[in-house]
Amino acid sequence: MAAIYRAAYRRAALFYRSHSTYVRKMRYLNKLKEDDSLCRQAQTSGTFYIFHNLSPFLQKVGKKYSILQLSAAEMKRILEKFKETEQWIEKSVLIGCSDEHVPHFALDLGALERSVIEVELKGSFTDLRKAFFVVDEKDSSLLASAQGLLRWHDSHQYCSKTGQPTQKNVAGSKRVCHASGITYYPQMSPVVIILVSDSSRCLLARQASFPQGMYTALSGFCDIGEAVEEAARREVAEEVGLEVESLWYSASQHWPFPSSCLMIACHALVRRQQLEISMNSLELEEARWFGLEEIMEGLKREPKSAKQDNGSYLPWFPPKQAIAHKLIDEWVKQQTSQPPQVL
Ligand SMILES: NC(=O)c1ccc[n+]([C@@H]2O[C@H](COP(=O)([O-])OP(=O)(O)OC[C@H]3O[C@@H](n4cnc5c(N)ncnc54)[C@H](O)[C@@H]3O)[C@@H](O)[C@H]2O)c1
Ligand SMILES: [Mg+2]
């Protein structure tokens, strides 16, 4: 028996020595997703981020907003206040873990009285459209993915083939319809976002629904069967009537509005021979070229200071939490650090 334990100990020690903190963490999370009883046990020692009808709970200290992590014991105390049983904990979804393998869960308390929780925990459930932009950047991506997963569960309670209820696994990484045997997995919609440039200017556009004065890069949902490159070329052609000459990938981001998009951000150069914009006015209100100076001024401008005395608005661009901001920033860096490219 002792030999078996020694061998197991040696294997564990080897695993710890030969894998980084990151690898161990990812392996642990993967195990929690696959193993219901391990995950149920993890819920008793994990921390909880709470939501109310998809709005995350925020606390304000001075001018700073932060998200609250409840311990399992605090979570239990809140639920007991409502005479709700711990069964509620089963509704939570796994959203990550610390380097020390403390698992993090998100739980939507939408069925409970909102104001009672707010008074008890000294904070407020805040619409994600505000919360996303006022918390620290790492917290905004955590809120976005937690809300995305909770939203997906909320809207996939029934099997689309049989109409029967689906059941989530403990971690919330899938739902199963036991009548049909179909397994459903959380989904995101791929969206391309493209910053078009003619090498000395870049093209930004606005939709009529945008806040006044805000311009951003072109974007669009990928069609089924399309590669990212094809979607990017099609969107540029559809929205502004230009043909992309070359395209390169920059970065990606999970974007929670209106619901779970995977933003795939690219830079594109268009043919110098055809720089005339032919805007699709069903989708866009305005699309135009911006020079470097105007972009640099727009990046410094706050939405609040964009309104002029005559009622018109000076251009401003999405905040740093949006991947469009990164694309615009990168374009400025290209312009200021490299000689202009000749097509
Ligand atoms: N994070 C950022 O920096 C950033 C910047 C720009 C746009 N976006 C996001 O990109 C998304 C798409 O941008 P867009 O409005 O230009 O797209 P778009 O040009 O494809 O037009 C939207 C239209 O596409 C159709 N559509 C096709 N597939 C869809 C799907 N899976 N979900 C919803 N609608 C679908 C609908 O008719 C919708 O009205 C938006 O959700 C927007 O919030 C994010
Ligand atoms: Mg679009």
Image (spheres, grey):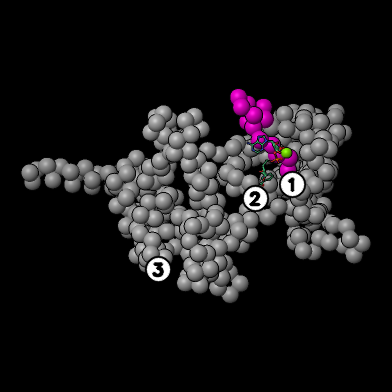
Calculate the distance from the C-alpha at mark 2 to the C-alpha at mark 1.
10 Å
Instruction: Let me know if residue 248 appears in the view.
Output: no
Q: In the image, is the residue at mark 2 within 8 Å of ligand 1 by its beta carbon?
A: yes
Residue 48 in percent (x, y) is at: 42, 59
Residue 73 in percent (x, y) is at: 34, 65
Q: Is residue 24 magenta?
A: no
**Of residues 206 and 328, the one drawn nearer to the viewer in this rendering:** 206
Element marked by disc 2: loop
Element marked by disc 3: helix
Q: Which residue is label 3 attached to?
A: 81
Calculate the distance from the C-alpha at mark 3 to the C-alpha at mark 1.
46 Å
Q: In the image, is the residue at mark 1 within 8 Å of ligand 1 by its beta carbon?
A: yes
Residue 216: mark: 1
- Whether tag 2 and tag 3 are in contact, CB under 8 A, the answer is no
Which stretch is magenta?
217-231
Above or below for 292 versus 55: above
Q: Which residue is label 2 attached to?
A: 322
Q: Quadrant of the C terminus?
A: top right
* Mark 3 neighbour density, 10 Å: few (under 14) some (14–19) many (20 or more): few
For badge 2, the amino acid type reads: Ala
